[in-house]
Image: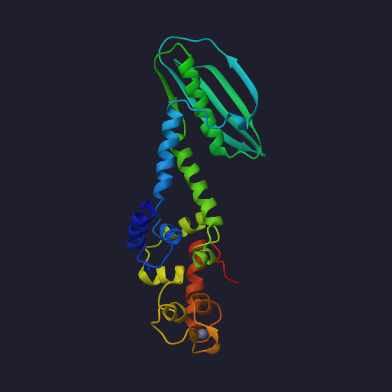
């Protein structure tokens, strides 16, 4: 049900044909899948409640030290990083302008920076819960981390999804798609090209709207979007224009 609703919204937003897959429609409309949004909200809820999201990734504690504590409200800052293949989560506690405690954790190298950020945030919340201070400000990159975790889910789905094959020909990587599509206002023609669902003989023939799926340039060639862009003699001029435009937008086209 959720998929049906968001697909309908995404299709309208990107002006694509109704046969376009949910994956492609979401990418072209630059929308985030609703279930990923819901997961982000759930992660945030879990983290705020101090739920353990991934201590299994932590290899060892690198360093911890306590400093003098003063009066006033404490603030804990969290961060996750990857430097030279080493993934670390770090926390630092400040009170009255002085650092009173800090901790760094080394994670397994396969962990992401986002997991490091989440673990740092979780540790900060645990420290607050176990501490005597009533009120502590925790500053982290949590919304950014959650958004990145959501994005990593999209990447996974995009890479594994069997739908949206044509869209993947244009944008092998989803982050590339977002980067390019951010810069353009998508038109119906663009949506047709980037999905292959549109005025191409192959597509029209599939829905019995055209007698043949072959191109006028060669009776052996199916008239589909990649044929038009890569080899069709009838559309030669427009291909060069499209290639140049595509290359300038993405900083390097995917077509040879
Ligand atoms: Zn042709």
Of the 4 image quadrants, the one containing the C terminus is bottom right
Give the percent coordinates (x, y) of residue 129.
46, 18
Q: How is the image coloured?
A: rainbow
Q: Is residue 135 left or right of residue 88?
A: left
Residue 61, quarter of picture: top right
Q: How many marks?
A: 0
Q: Is residue 145 left or right of residue 41?
A: right
205 versus 190 height, above or below:
below
Give the percent coordinates (x, y) of residue 67.
55, 12
Q: Residue at x 39, y 48 (%)?
A: 34
Give the percent coordinates (x, y) of residue 191.
40, 68
Give the percent coordinates (x, y) of residue 203.
44, 77
Q: Residue at x 46, y 18 (%)?
A: 128
Kindly give the residue lying farthest to the front in the view shown: 1
Q: Residue at x 38, y 65 (%)?
A: 186
Q: Nearer the viewer, residue 188 or 2?
A: 2
61 versus 211 height, above or below:
above
Q: Residue at x 43, y 34 (%)?
A: 44
Q: Nearer the viewer, residue 193 or 52?
A: 52
């Amino acid at each position: 049900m959720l998929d049906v609703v968001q697909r309908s919204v995404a299709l309208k937003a990107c002006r694509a044909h109704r046969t376009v897959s949910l994956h492609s429609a979401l990418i072209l409309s630059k929308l985030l899948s609703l279930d990923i949004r819901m997961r982000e909200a759930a992660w945030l809820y879990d983290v705020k409640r101090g739920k353990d999201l991934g201590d299994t990734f932590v290899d060892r504690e690198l360093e911890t030290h306590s400093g003098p504590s003063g009066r006033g409200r404490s603030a804990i800052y969290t961060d996750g990083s990857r430097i030279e293949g080493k993934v670390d989560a770090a926390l630092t506690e400040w009170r009255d302008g002085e650092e009173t405690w800090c901790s760094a954790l080394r994670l397994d190298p396969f962990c992401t920076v986002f997991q490091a950020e989440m673990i740092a945030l979780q540790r900060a919340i645990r420290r607050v819960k176990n501490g005597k201070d009533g009120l502590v400000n925790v500053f982290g990159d949590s919304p950014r981390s959650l958004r990145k975790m959501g994005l990593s889910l999209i990447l996974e789905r995009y890479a594994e999804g069997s739908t949206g094959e044509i869209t993947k020909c244009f944008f092998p990587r989803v982050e590339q798609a977002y980067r390019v599509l951010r810069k353009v206002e998508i038109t119906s023609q663009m949506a047709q090209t980037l999905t292959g669902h549109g005025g191409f003989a192959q597509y029209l023939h599939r829905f019995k709207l055209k007698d043949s799926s072959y191109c006028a340039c060669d009776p052996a060639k199916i008239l589909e979007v990649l044929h038009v862009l890569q080899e069709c003699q009838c559309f030669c001029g427009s291909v060069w224009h499209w290639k140049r435009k595509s290359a300038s937008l993405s900083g390097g086209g995917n077509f040879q």
